[in-house]
Amino acid sequence: MGICWGSPSPSSSINQSPVSTGNISSGVISQTTSNTISSGGSNVTNVSGNSQFSASSGGDEVFPSGQILPSPNLRIFSYAELKIATKNFRNDTVLGEGGFGKVHKGWLDDKGGSSRGGSGSVVAVKKLNSESMQGYEEWQSEVNFLGRLSHPNLVRLVGYCWEDKELLLVYEFMQKGSLENHLFGRGSAVQTLPWGIRLKILIGAARGLAFLHSSEKQIIYRDFKASNILLDGSYHAKLSDFGLAKIGPSASKSHVTTRVMGTYGYAAPEYVATGHLYVKSDVYGFGVVLVEMLTGMRALDTNRPSAQHTLVDWVKPHLSDKRKLKNIMDSRLEGKYPSRGAVLIAQLALTCLAAEQKTRPSMKEVVETLERVEAVNEKPRPPRVHASHNVASRYGQTSMNYRSPHHPRQDGNRGYQLPTR
């Protein structure tokens, strides 16, 4: 779940028996879920929603394949089932580890039950670390949001488990892992993403974010970053990790005020400075990922020279100059990208990174721009600047030692609140 500010306190109310009724409420969404576990297998939840976001989405015409369900449609798994599915949470099933806890690879049989033999449908099982300071509230938020949101560019939450202090989430498995791993990973197993695939990923992620913003009660994702963009076997992008998601402001207000939480390098400046969270605060984060896609460099990297630690601050002056842009392009692309397309992406990044949130484009406009870029049929041109002069090659990225929320970060540093100014 990333390196973030803020640390939600664990709730004492998680000490429920498996047959009790648990109240799932995040302050903005309240739903009562029957948490009864049957000894003969798993149940399907019947959650009556008292949610403040509406199933009547203003974006249905723009995104007809997405919908907000009237109530969550999630399976309740028993802890015993998930122990079987993950081979008793064996170390060799671990996909990654983050602040929430470990994520395991699991298997369900064709009937939806756990599979002992490592066969059947593959899922990702996120298990809360009992010592986690962020887990319960974010587990709650995942159930409340992903349990009702359905869109091709959002990771599907299959179900959950809540037994005593055990909190787990079960997701669809994304074969290619996170965008972060592909952009910054090292080693023979990591292949450079071609320009066309990068553009495909950006369009998919933008569509997912635009869907969230298009609902009647807009949903602010609040933690858009490369590690939260997961890829299936065809590099189809889906947003994951809704632990920090918030319902947007009412019609009479421009923003919601909340404790500053997010990831260094991606959070919008107005949010960091004031705690005022706007829908277009997400657009800033998208702009950061655009720059990462162009350069192949991390949003924040303390292994770079001090003036270059924050990627956006460093490269922003290069984005408006075609010649300077070539010097910061990812050297691993080897010049195999349309120069016109790169310029258009850089221009889009600049508008997304505008200091004043009002001047940033909507995500619907971002999608439309990216689709126009995709239509650019200019043939890639060989680079004129030798690779040794390329900024990205001089200051290479750090090695990848963690993954996305389904393949999460290894450092587990999330949980630090931004110092007050």
Image (tube, rainbow, N blue to C red):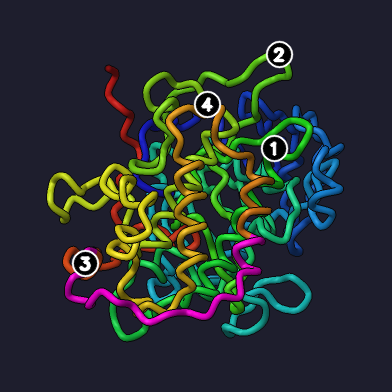
Distance, label 2 to label 1, CA atoms, is: 39 Å
Query: Residue pushed farthest left?
Result: 305
Q: Is residue 369 above or below residue 332?
A: above
Q: Are marks 2 and 1 in contact (CB under 8 Å)?
A: no
Query: Which residue corresponds to mark 4?
Result: 277
5 in relation to 299, above or below: above
Earlier residue among tags 2 and 1:
1
Residue 400 lies, in percent from the top left, at 29, 67
Q: Nearer the viewer, mark 1 or mark 3?
A: 3
- The residue tagged with tag 1: helix, strand or loop? loop
Looking at numbered disc 2 in the image, what kind of residue is underneath it? Ser
Q: Quadrant of residue 197?
A: bottom right
For marks 2 and 1, give the one nearer the viewer. Answer: 2
Write down the region rendered in magenta. Answer: 371-391
Q: Which residue is mark 3?
A: 396
* Residue 373, numbered circle: none
Name the one closer to the observer, 251 or 357.
357
Q: In whole angstroms, how far apart are the C-alphas of marks 3 and 2? A: 47 Å
Look at discs 4 and 3 and give the one toward the viewer. Answer: 3
- Mark 3 neighbour class, 10 Å CA radius: few under 14, some 14 to 19, many 20 or more: some
Task: For the C terminus, give its image quadrant.
Answer: top left
Q: In the rendering, at what x and y percent does residue 56 appear?
A: 86, 37
Which kind of residue does numbered mark 1 sit on?
A: Ser
Q: Nearer the viewer, residue 50 or 372?
A: 372
Label 1 with label 3: CB-CB less than 8 Å = no
The quarter holding residue 94 reads bottom left
> Which residue is depicted at the point 13% across and 46% down?
306
Q: CA distance from mark 4 to mark 3?
A: 33 Å
Q: Is residue 161 above or below residue 222?
A: below
